[in-house]
Amino acid sequence: MKDAIECFADHIVETNFSDIPDRAIHSAKTFILDTLGVGLAGSTGPYVEELLNAYSSASPAELTSRVLGQRARINSADAALINGFQIHNSEFDCVHEEAVIHTMTVLLAVLLADADRRGKINGIELLKSAILGVDVACNLGVACTSGLQFFRPATAGAFAGVAAVGSVRGYDKEQLIRAFSLAYIQLSGTMQAHTEGSSLLALQIGFNARNALIACDLAENGLPGLQGVLEGRFGYFGLIEAQGDIRSVLSSLGKTWRINEVAHKPFPSGRATHGIVNAIQEIQNLNTINVDQIDSVEAKVPSLTHHLVGRPIHDAMEISYARLNGQYAASIMLQKHFIDIDDFTIDAIRNKGSLDLARKVHIKIDDNPDPNALSPVEVEIRMENGEKFFKRLDTVYGNPNKPLTRDAHLAKFRRNWQASAISLPIEDGEEIIKIIDNLEEIEDIRVLIDLATG
């Protein structure tokens, strides 16, 4: 039996833009814009400057690609790395909840770097390649039946990056399989960084973006592939993912467009915090909650949610730790009825009032048996006078079944645009919105990079 990677290669090679439904194209436009904005917000994040310094020594001939929100030109593989790091470091990037994958993060980082180097990638190619890359990554995630041990957004993301680059470069099936193979042997990124709430988590995204681009370059220059990338004795399923049934998703290729299942992140914190804070938000919408009179808050969540964001609050949190802390996110929502980028500065996350309120939030594991579930979530707010407020959420704000409005989506992008490390004209942000709305008409997507790098 042939390895299932061949089915993904067939899907990429055989899919024409005309085969893709309008809804999937609309979704792709939404999340391309969203991801560009998130990458700009991440340009001011911790350790970005250090990464730029580390990768700025290439010879002039290699300085082919730019970095979102920066006036820097570096080689393409390093640009993919830093763009990937920036897109994920603010925990604001879109996610496929069932697959537990940040779907656009690696693939757009790779595509931007390659487009800047090679040129003449048009809007239709960008849309098609993004949709196909999301299909590959999400189906790998949906097929998993065990919990995360490697960081799936990075590992599956590398396959998405290869699929996207292979699509725009016009690879045939054999080239794609070799490129997937060469990405597989470079996969990296465990859950230890997430468990510790470390900034290295976003670097794992960056490494896999870089490695996906390198894999494509190597395949294009004739390096060989593997026969059992996904299902071999030491293939992806069984080694990177402990358990899964990849065959169960193959029949959905070309029928179920996973880009339509992707969720927005309305707040710049781990998606696993969003069920808790959305439940609080909905309680606040119907009731007046005096935060000074809160006795305690209890959130019952699936085991994965608890692992991802149930870490204890402490006085000396780093920014990456705070973004993945459900207690802190709940505290900010209780106080402000919203969570935004400026809630994750050192001054904000060390605020005594916020920390004291966060310590009243208790996150407990429910009896959900699914190791990959992020919902349902139950929240109860208990007041000092004995009054209680309760909310259960099966669907979390940002999910396609509970989506952001277009106005909310654009407001998020505009806030992120203004958060860039370099000052970008407001009118250029509006121009990007118009360009992506009409992406099919764009002959060279470097116009997006031009605007997003000043």
Image (cartoon, helix red, strand yellow):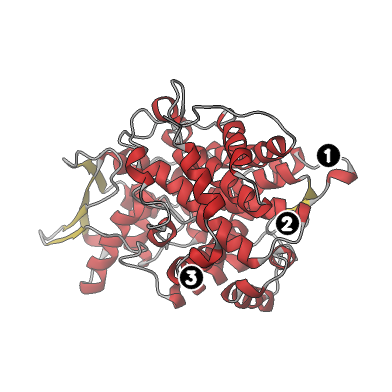
**Which quarter shows the C terminus?**
bottom right
Name the spot of residue 102 as percent of width and height, x first.
47, 49
Secondary structure under badge 1? loop
Closer to the camera in the image, 307 or 22: 22
Whole-percent x and y of residue 421? 68, 59
Of callouts 2 and 3, which one flags the residue occurring earlier in the amino acid sequence?
3
Q: Which is more toward the observer, 180 or 1?
A: 1
Q: Is residue 29 above or below residue 375?
A: below
Residue marked by disc 2? 70
> For the view shown, which residue lies furthest in the left direction?
386
The furthest residue to the top: 233
Amino acid type, mark 3: His
Instruction: Give the amino acid at mark 2.
Output: Gln
* Side (left or right) of 18 relative to 122: left
- What x and y, as percent, mark residue 376? 22, 52
Q: CA distance from mark 2 to mark 1?
A: 16 Å
To which residue does mark 1 refer? 57
Q: Given the image, on which type of amino acid does mark 1 rest? A: Ser
Badge 3 is on which residue? Answer: 26
What kind of element bears circle 3? helix
Q: Nearer the viewer, mark 2 or mark 3?
A: 3
Res 221 → quadrant: top right
Quarter occupied by the N terminus: top left
Is residue 347 visible in the rendered structure shown here?
Answer: no
- Which of the two discs, 2 and 1, labels the residue nearer the N terminus? 1
**Label 3, residues with CA under 10 Å away: few <14, some 14-19, many ≥20:** some
